[in-house]
Image (cartoon, rainbow, N blue to C red):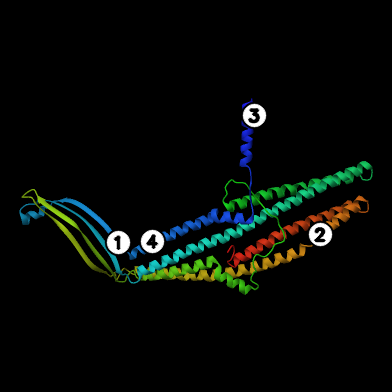
Amino acid sequence: MKFITLAVLAITILSGNRAEARTLNLEQAISIAMEKNHDIEKAREYAKYVQGRYLEERSAALPQLSLNASGALSQDQSQKAQLGSAPHQYSGLIDVTVSQPLYTWGKVNAAIRAAEFGLQTADQQLRLYRQAAFRDVTAAYYDVLLTRELHRLAVENQRQKARHLEEAKRKFAAGVATDYDVLAAEVTAENARPEAIRSQHAIRTAKERLRFLLALKEEDIQVAGTLEMPTADRPAPITYEEAFLSAQKHRPELADLKLRISVYDELITIANAENKPRLDLKGGAGWRWSILDDPGPRRDADGPAWNVGVYLTFPFFDGFKSSGKVAQARSDLRTKQIEQFKLLDSIALEVREAGFALQEAAEIYEAVSGTVRQAERLVQMAEKGYEYGVKIRLEVEDAQLNLLQAKSNLAKAQRDYRVARVNYAWTTGIAGE
């Protein structure tokens, strides 16, 4: 029995340790996202891919070396017409061959340049996902703070309604309130429960989204901090023109698309060289041997062998295959250029919308920042008046509802302003940088 008790106690302690939540502030959450976010990990793998692609394309400009060896047995009966017999022939060789492009009509150089542009796209892809993670994690972090504050307000409202119910029961017992007052207070108290439950589950949902962005799997997390008066980390561009200019310079997806346009421009050169002359240096050196016997006397010889030469290849007519490739490459380039124009228009719209959203959030915050103090004073006055019998219960409930709405609006305004600032920084291409 004692052993069972100790085992249960140990399991309880271990379970408690596993359930211990990890508390993070905003900087820690962003730091974890920069290391573990799946999109960022994917961008790092893409960088490895384009590095490999660059090595592949660069190899075309380097000498190609190959070691070859063979051994063969053959017999040709037609040799009887010349030699009177058809001896068995044993032959073998081992050599090293080399091939080096000398001139490719710009094809190899264009492929290397395209691969270099591809390397640069990897940097922009990483920036793109880092900025997106910074934006999303920041918004998710403030969502947790908001849901936590709304839950606190809901619980506070529920407790306040419970106190009013107790006050109504006390007055009913003293004969200064009716059973209607008690019943109304009970209904009001019960109506406060759903919002408390709903806000509790909203906290869980917000934390799950943050945990997903941080790629923390099953680890429980908590966030540190409160929704206080937001402060500007850096001055925001004053005008739309400044913001759009910043976006044109810093948005990673725009820089990535410009690099890809350069890649497609090089692909035209590559396609155009398909039916053009090229020169290659080819050579080899090694050792060969040969044996002839049966029938006749055995004859054998061996020795070094080598060859070297310059070879011209000119596929001057390929059935218009190269022309088709050039047309496709030019169409792909034009498509990417159209995508660039479309992306610029989309970014311009995003900058305008983000600027409007930031202005709206700032104005709302200024509008509600002083309302809470007024609503708190109004509740105090209503409760005192109700206690002395000069205010009715409905007036108290109206004052409490106004206070709850004021606090909720303030919390939402604080969250919206912070998120709007981050989103504005993201649209201008400087989020997290």
The residue to which callout 4 is attached is: 55
Binning the other alpha carbons within 10 Å of mark 4 as few (below 14), some (14 to 19) or many (20 upward) gives few
Q: Is residue 298 visible?
A: yes
Which disc is residue 347 wearing? none
> Which of pointers 3 and 2 lies earlier in the amino acid sequence?
3
Q: Residue at x 66, y 56 (%)?
A: 142
Q: Quadrant of residue 172?
A: top right
The residue to which callout 2 is attached is: 373
Q: Position of residue 293 (x, y in %)?
A: 9, 50
Q: Amino acid at mark 1?
A: Gln
The residue to which callout 3 is attached is: 5
Q: Nearer the viewer, mark 3 or mark 4?
A: 3
Tell me if label 4 and label 1 are in contact, CB under 8 Å: no
Q: Amino acid at mark 4?
A: Leu
Left or right: residue 426 compared with residue 188: left
> Which of pointers 2 and 4 lies earlier in the amino acid sequence?
4
Q: CA distance from mark 3 to mark 4?
A: 65 Å
* Nearer the observer, 31 or 140: 31
Q: Quadrant of the C terminus?
A: bottom right
